[in-house]
Image (tube, grey):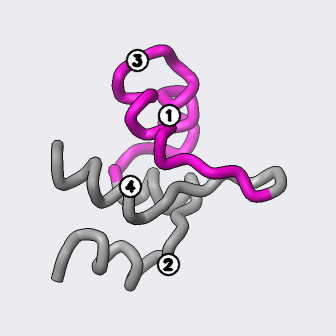
Amino acid sequence: MTTEEQLIERYGPLLSLIDLSELLKRSPDGLRISLRSQTEFAEQWNAARRKVGRRVYFRASVVAELIDTA
């Protein structure tokens, strides 16, 4: 089973910020601060970011790709 299949099975096609912070073993506030910075980490992970209304989600396919290439 690929990383993408595992993420979709567990979280669905979109991960919330809480889901992503749990997956990366970081606090939600710490992750939120990291994503607002001007770093390579923020650029890569913000590529997976999608807004639905006022909520922020991360595409499971891009998250899996980032995890596999890390």
Q: Distance between the residues labelled 3 and 2?
A: 28 Å
Percent coordinates x, y for residue 20 in the rendering:
45, 55
Q: Is mark 3 on a helix, strand or loop?
A: loop
In the image, the segment drawn in magenta is: 24-52
Marks 2 and 4: which is nearer the front?
4
Q: What element carries label 2?
A: loop
Residue 39's mark? 3
Q: Distance between the residues labelled 4 and 1?
A: 21 Å
Question: Circles 4 and 1: CB distance less than 8 Å?
Answer: no
Sequence-first disc among 4 and 3 = 3
Q: Is residue 4 in the magenta section?
A: no
Left/right of residue 25 with respect to residue 43 in the rendered view: left
Residue at position x 37%, y 55% in the image:
63
Q: What residue type is labelled 2?
A: Gly
Sequence-first disc among 3 and 2 = 2
Residue at position x 24%, y 52% in the image:
67
Q: What element carries label 4?
A: helix
**Disc 1: which residue:** 30
Q: Which of 41 and 20 is in front in this view?
A: 41
Percent coordinates x, y for residue 66 in the rendering:
28, 48
Q: Distance between the residues labelled 1 and 3?
A: 14 Å
Marks 4 and 1: which is nearer the front?
4
Question: Circles 1 and 3: CB distance less than 8 Å?
Answer: no
Q: Is residue 30 in the magenta section?
A: yes
Task: Give the image quarter of residue 62.
Answer: bottom left
**Disc 2: which residue:** 12
Marks 1 and 3: which is nearer the front?
3
Q: What residue type is labelled 4?
A: Val
**Disc 4: which residue:** 62
Percent coordinates x, y for residue 45 in the rendering:
43, 40
Task: Give the image quarter of residue 36.
Answer: top right
Q: In this view, does 37 lie above or below 35?
A: above
